[in-house]
Image (cartoon, rainbow, N blue to C red):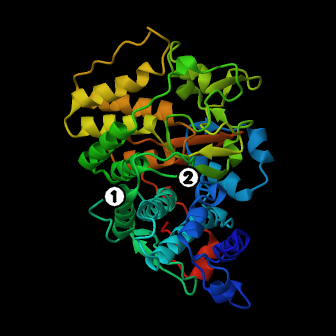
Amino acid sequence: MCSMKNIYAIIGLVSSSLNFSCSEFLDEKPDIKMVVPKSLTDVELLLNDYAAMNMGYPLLGEWATDDYYLTKQSWEAIANQDQRNAYIWKDEPYEDAVQWQRPYKTVYIANQVLEILSGLPKTGDPPTYQRVYGAAHFFRAFAFHQLLEVYAPAYDSSTAGVELGIPLRLSPDIDGSVGRANLSDSYGQVLSDYRIAISNLPGNEGRKGQPHKAAAHAGLARAYLYMGMFAEAYLHADSAIQLSPELMDYNKLKETDNFPVPRFNGEVLFPAMSTNAGPMGFTIALVDSTLYASYAESDLRRTIFFRSNAAPTGSYLYRGNYDRTSAQLFVGLTTSEIYLIKAEAAVRVGKSAEALLALNTLLKKRWELNSFVDIEEADAGRLLAIILQERRKELLFRGRRWADLKRLNTEGAFQKTLVRKIGDQQYTLEPNSPKYAVRLPESVVRIGNLQQNKR
């Protein structure tokens, strides 16, 4: 078996050059053959690297959302200029390439695993081979979709063939650059990888951080939702719930804990964490006051998710992180999100009864015992609005808001102009602004010869 020290050394070396020409970064090309993993055990260990595969997903979009605000003092204290600019939608070139590179590190490892598997016999340990093969496709799909949500425009089937997507690196070859695929092909790759994952992953996975069949259905449901393919989103959300229906009862959580939501709880289908939380950090990000006021007194999320803040008076901090940390945001897949996807997709395809059942099933686990009264709404339009509001209340600080704003802005009824105030200065972000496709880092554009997002 290849030394894991050597495996991680080569991964660290190549990850810095992803999407760039190798010669730009390396004076001498490393002899990869000397350190590359070769066995099924080796590649399984690669996918078990939690820091490489489950962490480091981009937050540039979330920093620009309306789920939180900063005081003038907190904003001015942020040292990172990209973070300051993202908060006020200032269209300056981004220099920090980490948020772009980290998901591509995950993609690189997944590609390396798939290439090694292609040279190994399937007969040695068929169940392990199949599981690792499915997991590699899952990780690649998840990473690609995370990048698309930040750096690509909202999906529209009528324009996806000409809109810019992302570079689709499908092999571990680090020589040369790969241009940006169109949005249609980019999402097509995400769908393809998730489908392969569904066909190969086991129904259950005891190891934390590793995907299983329900997680792959959940990832596919999420992708279909953002593509506006609601019938497909409904089917895969339903499949995920059939395999893994568990919801936490918030009545059993301890609101006296600093972070009341347990890590790796039964709702977590696939754990994933962002890069550094930056302006959305636990100590400085103040929950939008209108959003906080929307929680009913008997809604336990009001106390589980939030902690009152001394100053400014009447402000609240978010503490509902599903990883029990303040350093990064949880951006993974959970059953709570999938119930909401099922509810939204159901009402959009004329299945209001199924939508109500999914929504009420979730909310019963979020309210005080015997206090929740089932929602009964016959009008599909009003029910959709209720579901979207509950989606925002359930999934805040979970990496969903930026992509939700982007897709919902394409519907007139749900368009929203975002407003920030820093002292006397006011900033706005209009619906369907090209800024919803975040600028690529300038170093990535320059060295990789990639096309920048239009403005």
Q: Which residue is mark 1?
A: 199
Which residue appears farthest toward the top when viewing the image?
370
The residue at 36%/40% (across/down) is 243
| Residue 320: quadrant of the picture | top right
Element carrying mark 1: helix
x, y percent for residue 250: 53, 21
- Quarter that holds the N terminus: bottom right
Pick the residue in front: 376 or 190.
Answer: 190
**Is residue 357 among the parts visible in the rendering?**
yes
Circle nearer the viewer, 2 or 1: 1
Q: Which residue is mark 2?
A: 61
Element carrying mark 2: loop
x, y percent for residue 380: 24, 30
The residue at 57%/87% (across/down) is 175
Q: Residues within 10 Å of mark 1 (few under 14, many from 20)?
A: some
Structural distance between the alpha carbons of marks 2 and 1: 32 Å
Pick the residue in front: 46 or 256.
Answer: 46
The residue at 28%/61% (across/down) is 157
